[in-house]
Image (spheres, rainbow, N blue to C red):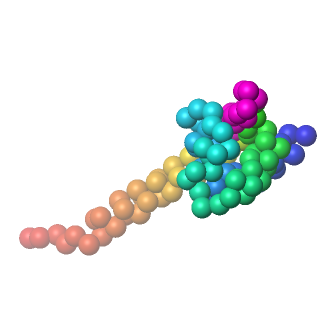
Amino acid sequence: MASDTLDATFAALADPTRRAILARLAQGEATVMELAAPFAMSQPGVSKHLRVLERAGLISRGRDAQRRPCRLEATRLKTAMDWLADYRSYWEESYQRLDDLLGELEAGTSGAGEREVR
């Protein structure tokens, strides 16, 4: 089940329009029309992106009289961040090994080109 959740989250995040929608919703709720405004696409086109985000659990839609505001649901993003964090130590260790190797190479070549002057 966790794999399905991650798959849906990363699939939804793969599209730059959906990432932009999430960034806008991080500032507060918005209607479909407000979310569609910055994009050169129709309201139905934006609605399709919203359905993908909603199925992935990244947004929810409420009902406020005639408005249906969308809200960011950050729990799934946290799940993805937690999954990615598992790889952070791997990359930190890899970069540290690279830094150590570069330091050794630099130390080994810094003295090699110098000549003793008498």
**Residue 63 falls left or right of residue 110:** right
Image location of residue 50, percent across then percent down: 74, 47
Image location of residue 59, percent across then percent down: 73, 38
**Residue 81 falls left or right of residue 98:** right
| Residue 20 vertical placement versus 109 (above, below) | above
**Magenta residues, dominant SS class:** loop
**Residue 108 falls left or right of residue 70:** left
The residue segment tinted magenta is 63-77
Can residue 30 be seen here? The reply is yes
Image location of residue 98, percent across then percent down: 51, 57
Image location of residue 73, percent across then percent down: 71, 33
Query: Along the line of sight, which residue is nearer the eye, 117 or 10?
Result: 10
Work out which residue is located at the far front of the displayed protein and give it: 66
Can residue 88 be seen here? The reply is no
Residue 74: in magenta span:
yes
**Residue 9 falls left or right of residue 3:** left
Residue 19: in magenta span:
no
Query: Along the line of sight, which residue is nearer the eye, 29 or 107?
Result: 29
Q: Quadrant of the C terminus?
A: bottom left
Work out which residue is located at the far top of the displayed protein and give it: 64
Q: Quadrant of the N terminus?
A: top right
Q: Residue at x 34, y 67 (%)?
A: 109
Q: Which residue is drawn at 64% across and 55% down?
A: 17
